[in-house]
Amino acid sequence: MGQKVAIVGAGITKFVRRAQETGKELAWQAAKMALDSCELTLDDIESVSCGTAPDAFDGVHEKGEYLSDGCGGWRKPYMRQFVGGGTGVFAPIHGWLHVASGMFDTCLVVCAEKMSSCHPHPQGAFKTIFDHTTEQPLDPTLVWIFAMEYNRYMTTYGIDKRDIALVSVKNKKNAMDHPAAQLPMEITVDDVLNSEVLAWPVNRLDISPTSDGAAAIVLAGEHAAKRITDKPVWIEGVGWNLDSAYWASRDLAYPRYVEKAARMAYDMAGIREPKKEIEIAEPYDPFTYKELHHMEGLLLADRGEAPQLLVDGVTQRDGARPMCPSGGALGVGNPIAATGLMKTIEIFLQLRGEAGKRQVPGSPRCGLAQAWGDLMQVGTVVVLKR
Amino acid sequence: MGLTERIERNVDLSYFEGRIPVNYLYTYGLGFEKFFRALKEEGKLLASKCPRCGTTYFPCRVFCEQCFCEIEGTLGVSGEGTLYSYSVCHLNMDGSPKKTPEVVGLIEMDGTDGAKFVHLIDAQPEEIQIGMRLKPVLKPKKERNGDIFDIKGFKKA
Ligand SMILES: [Zn+2]
């Protein structure tokens, strides 16, 4: 590759159920914060990458074009990309390609999502992701396909639902220290199990909320990064992978596509023993079981063993391998495309020692963020080091 | 650092309503056309087998996702299978509660290479188990329209 790429600045809006701001206003707020954080202006930015999920959320087609001024994209090389929930980590990968290729020295990456416009709920928009001949007539919701994945994962390894519920307890509590959080709270395992059943085994508190919000980062090539900051965080590995869209026919107990994306990123970053070398991670957690499922796909836990690490406290903020110290999608919120970038920003802050009350002990040097999406079959991974 | 600048405005909002004035007419496609014709007219369920790698797909398709080669023929399968996973759905798409919870499942189809089919399961939630054997329930021929509800659902075999 042409050059090394660092994250040098970041910004994030508060995640809320319904923002007054339009999507492009949210994008502008996050982008401006990211530029201000590293004392740059839009004039210093050579290319812009926008990540945003289905146009149907806003009912605005060509949403990349709609958001483009809020992203600072006008009169610049601007691209929008989208892989569903995987977008928020695909966006830094996309920006990395711009800079690593040597084409640009700086790239502003902006992810914005406004889900609340969809009335009464975005499930109607999600429905059109499914096959229109064989599946849509059954009125599928995203919740029930995840319920089937949850059930298969739990049944395959004989996992207790109480252990899976602990993910929600941990992440919502972690979110109490996050200034952007939508659903920070202190709850118990029983609260999760006693919350409304949406589609068994998924209860209300197993699932992340719908959210409005935006996040942004500034990427810079090796020389530019060192001029901009004395604390660059380097993107050392990137990986992405897409499995069959015949979602039902996949092995639902194990996310093979996440493993493929992780191995691609690990190879690039020279990581041979992820369990030892990845000190901190933000696996994508739109549902409780997904944090565990993804830890296994990321090779940070053996198959079926992630719940035990959680029960033993290993994945708490002060544990040996903290997972979702930000509070994750469950606690901070889940404005689809922005969530993965929020996670990337969390690792950036943790590695810089700037995570405030959320700071994990031990001054970590290497971490990863991961997201997942499309029809449950895309994995996106970035490995960061300081 | 940008993250510390917390933006909290989330006031009581005014809003206006909008809608996208579009409707759709979908074709079945080359593969599903064969599938739904056979289902409607003969009550048969068709799979297809890749001539190169031998993978058997259900419902039938016209190309192999692995070899990328064309699949011309079809073969019938019994429609029976094994329950791979399921969920009991309590809410409608708009978030309102269902009158009776609905069971949806993934059925791993006999005679295929692990192809799974998603459909309604006609059983009480208490009697359902992953691994149970299931068979399809078809509508009588005169009621069949060539859509997915020509199969009413699956029940215990
Ligand atoms: Zn083949």
Image (tube, coloured by chain):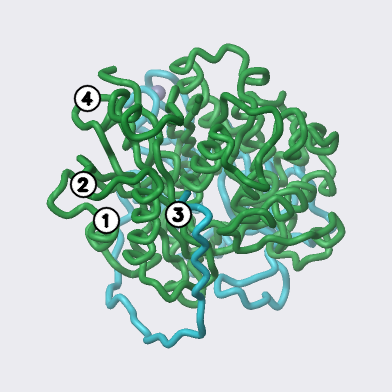
Chain colours: A green, B cyan
Q: Which mark is residue A130?
A: 3
How far apart marks 3 and 4 lie (CA) works out to 39 Å
**Which numbered disc, 1 or 3, marks the residue closer to the eye?**
1
Residue A200 image-quadrant placement: bottom right
The numbered mark, 1 or 2, whose residue comes first in the sequence reads 1
Q: Nearer the viewer, mark 2 or mark 3?
A: 2
Q: Amino acid at mark 2?
A: Tyr
For the point 64% across and 42% down, the residue is: A324
Query: Dot 3: what SS?
Result: loop
- Badge 3 and badge 4 both on one subunit: yes
Residue B34 in view, yes or no: no
Q: Amino acid at mark 3?
A: Phe
Q: Which residue is mark 4?
A: A102
Q: Locate residue A381 relative to residue A218 in the image: left or right.
A: right
Q: Chain of mark 1?
A: A
Q: Earlier in the sequence, mark 3 or mark 4?
A: 4
Give neighbour class at mark 2: few <14, some 14-19, many 20+ (Cα, 10 Å): many
